[in-house]
Image (cartoon, grey):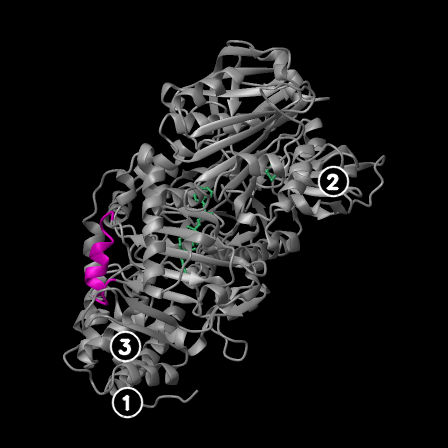
Amino acid sequence: MKKFNFHVKPIGLLDMLNFKKLVPNRTQALAEGSPERATASYEVNKLATYLHPKSQQAEITEIIEHGEIAKTFILSGKELAPFRAGQYLSVKLEIGKSILTRPFSISSSPKWVKEGKYALTIKRAPNGFASDWILENWKVGTKVSVSGPEGVFYYEPLRDSKNVVCIAGGSGITPFLSMAYAIRDGIEDFNMTILYGSCTENEILYKKELDQITENCDKVKVIHVLSKEQSSCYEFGFITSEIIEKYAEGEYSVFMCGPSVMYDFVGKELEKLSLKSKFIRREMLAAPSSPKKFKEYKGKIDKEFKLTVKRFGEVLIVPMKAEETVLIALERAGIAVPSKCRGGECGFCRSRLESGEIFTPDELDARRIADIKEGYIHPCCTYPLSDLVIEVWPEQGEQYEEKH
Amino acid sequence: MENIYDVVVIGAGNGGLSAAATAAKNGLKTLLVEQHNLPGGFATSFRRGRFEFEPSLHELCDLGPEENPGDIRKLLERLDVKIEWVPVPEAYRVITTNEGEDNLDVTMPFGVDAFVDKMEEYVPGSRPSMEKFMTLCQNIMDALAYIGKSAGKADSKVLMKEHPNFLKCGGYSVNQVLKAIKMPKKAQRILSAYWCYFGVDGEMLNFAIYGAMVYKYLTRGAYIPKNRSHELSAAMDRRIRELGGDIWYNTRAEKIIMENQKVTGVITDHGVIKCSHVIACCSPNAVFGEMMEKDDVPEKQTRMVNARKFGGRGFVVYLGLNKSAEEIGLTDYSYFIYESLDTVKEVARAKDFNSHPIQATVCLNAANPECSPEGTCIMSFTTFYSEDVWGNIGADEYVEKKREVALNMIRDFEKNVGVSLIPYIEEIEIATPVTMARYTLNPQGTMYAYECSGWDTMLARLMMLEDDQIVSGIRFAGGYGPRIYGYSSTYLNGEMTAKLTIADRRENAK
Ligand SMILES: Cc1cc2nc3c(=O)[nH]c(=O)nc-3n(C[C@H](O)[C@H](O)[C@H](O)COP(=O)(O)OP(=O)(O)OC[C@H]3O[C@@H](n4cnc5c(N)ncnc54)[C@H](O)[C@@H]3O)c2cc1C
Ligand code: FES
């Protein structure tokens, strides 16, 4: 590049006076500020904290039973954060020696927040640990601590088609129930066709509520699909591409929420419809309790390892099973660490791997590219292949002393 | 357990990261505390579906190629931080939407010669004034290097003798100087296109600072990290630990303990840390208004905090599109779309809840084709508000409002660049000042710390480095520091602050 040797003559009107004034001008201006105590908390900051509280305290004020299989808990609290229909809360639990979290979609209308209420519908999971415990132990009057509303499983008009086919399995109906209420209440505006898979008519959650919504609101349609019971009122079998095509109208988006077997099955059916990936959204799933499910897994499932945990200058050593995630090992040991989605997506559990071999399934690996390079892990979807040394940073204000 | 450190750095923004690395490298026992679970502050990344988005960086000024390293490459070499860089292809494309003589669509290249030539093509007769401009910039660079080295003690005799042109223009605004060197109006305006990186109009923006930045961009080009800014922040994080420093994430500094007007520790939500020095990469508002006891803050200090005005508050729309940049027809990397090239009018428009705001838009793939899966691309549309407009929005209208602005920005881009985007949106995220307040805790969600205009320019701040130091033991890295905001400035602030802290310690030891 050629250098300019152009000589600037004293330039026009400008002189040095202004330069000399820089310091006195600034000194004077600084002295003229108000003597009132300064603040860093403005309306925008307050709105940020209101919309995204680190945690919220609520009390169970009502319980609705759905036969043997599920219960809806009404959580009441002050200044609960508003949410977008489809979002979830991460519930903090202490069960025996363990400190853990579980994510649950909010099943109530976003409108309810104004009255200080969220509803969580919790279904007994096969071999469930936390869900069983909650169904047994949460009573009217129980105090619970939950996160702010989390997750990105919601309708977004700038992105999604105006017609949305929502495929639900079992307790996967909860985010869709909230969306249906939101449409009914004029908070969201899209055409919703729910294809809801249950085993039998008895196991359909919220049958009555869904019927009421569809009666009053023609933007919401519900089709029940039963896999173990035949009836003229319902579709029979699994949710196939034929069923989807039968009820879908025009261009549409597909939203899915349900167990992993449903994702596997419906995922294959959707391939037949050759939808663009932008039109398929699924609520994430918690990482499975064993890594065996993943084809890439090469570890020995029955091994036990040593987990060394560095935490704010302390070092703790706890046992860990090859079969379980690092997050579960931490929780079993009563070491509270941050977690929300438990499926690799939110990054809230991000921790530093100092040494050791790990397995993170590709389909759950949503880490940042540089984090993978620099050895950061999301313990909620990381299975150990050897002894590990990690560093964790429990959340702000989180009580992180051992329970024992 | 007792935690004792020489220095506690509050906040792992760019300033905090480079301060902590510099302190640790110089043998200080260093603890960096960060309330979020990631390093970088604004310099981070986030994932949605198949995409990893860059939240803030458009172009890093002053890295420079290996053979012509700028201050930032040198700084990173000193700290031994290595990452992969991608050059940005052209300086900028600027489009104005007003009809009439103001209407234009020009693409400006990097390189002083190429830039001057291109300007001559667009504005015949602009060459002599453009050459003057470039020479002035060179003079300014030399003078700023001298002032930077002198750490607040620049000798006016040296300045007068060695840097007369700098003294002549250093106290004036961009508009005043460009007019004085008789640059044609249209060229002045094209040249001022980067103004939105400061969020300050040409009447208020200090010429020396603007000239230095333009010149650095033109002579050294601009770069971005291959894997978003998080790559740089994560590499800094590793270096700090390698150099013996500790980093505590999810840890918020709540109070600074003072005894006899000296810092003795920091109270965090994870315990008390004893230390004699604090480097704050957060706002002086938080430090003097919240972390320190009222009685420990001298009135003069409080007045200084309250006298200052917050800089621009950002608003960004991020799109992951399911078509490639070529298929869509996005040929350029950086687009400035303004109503007119009159910076005063444009800044005035940013005061209100304007539904068609100015935009600085980037198609990441135009510089970094591998940043997203094949057949897709990433865009971000940025605007700023010069007043606390989002402070008046209630929680009820928040989602609607942000969608409204986002949609207008996307549509304005579609119309003015002649492309279609909306049908291809696979992922969308919208960040407002509220989002930025959430993640970085900056007051009003400002991305540009304190505005650097009028009386509070970088030049004046640098010359008053020591006058500004009222409470001993606390110094500011980051955007609130003397070298102002922006990536390169904050990295340099961090290093400088750490060095000054080391000097303070020597002074105290005496
Ligand atoms: C949309 C956008 C686009 C931009 N584009 C560019 C660009 O192209 N080029 C450029 O150079 N600049 C750009 N910038 C500006 C640049 O990002 C910022 O000026 C710069 O990153 C500020 O760095 P900082 O060091 O001041 O810290 P910040 O990024 O403000 O970080 C401060 C950190 O401190 C933490 N913290 C705060 N309080 C506490 C506490 N009490 N305890 C513990 N931790 C605390 C916060 O969590 C945060 O991590 C852009 C900014 C935005 C928002
Ligand atoms: S808890 Fe969400 S990524 Fe681990």
- Amino acid type at mark 2: Tyr
* Residue at x-position 25% and y-position 60%: B453
Mark 1 Cβ and ligand 1 under 8 Å apart = no
Q: How many marks?
A: 3
Rendered position, B393 above or below B133: above
Q: Is residue A255 magenta?
A: no
Task: Classify residue A35 by image quadrant.
Answer: top left
Question: Circle 3 — which element?
Answer: helix
Q: Residues within 10 Å of mark 2 (few under 14, many from 20)?
A: many
Disc 2 target residue: A383
Disc 3 target residue: B166
Numbered mark located on residue B110 in the image: none
Disc 1 target residue: A7
- Amino acid type at mark 1: His
* Location of residue A287 in the rendering, given as x and y in whole percent from the top left corner: 67, 36
Horizontally, is B134 left or right of B240 in the view? left
Q: Which residues are magenta?
A: B339-353
- Amino acid type at mark 3: Phe
* Location of residue A221 in the rendering, given as x and y in whole percent from the top left corner: 48, 28
Q: Nearer the viewer, residue A249 or B470?
A: A249
Horizontally, is B256 left or right of B323 in the view? left
Horizontally, is B430 left or right of A177 in the view? left
Q: Mark 2 or 1 closer to N-term?
A: 1
* Residue at x-position 60% and y-position 34%: A243
Rendered position, A57 above or below B307: above
Separation of residues labelled 3 and 1 (CA atoms): 13 Å
Both on one chain, marks 2 and 3? Answer: no
Nearer the camera: disc 2 or disc 3: 2
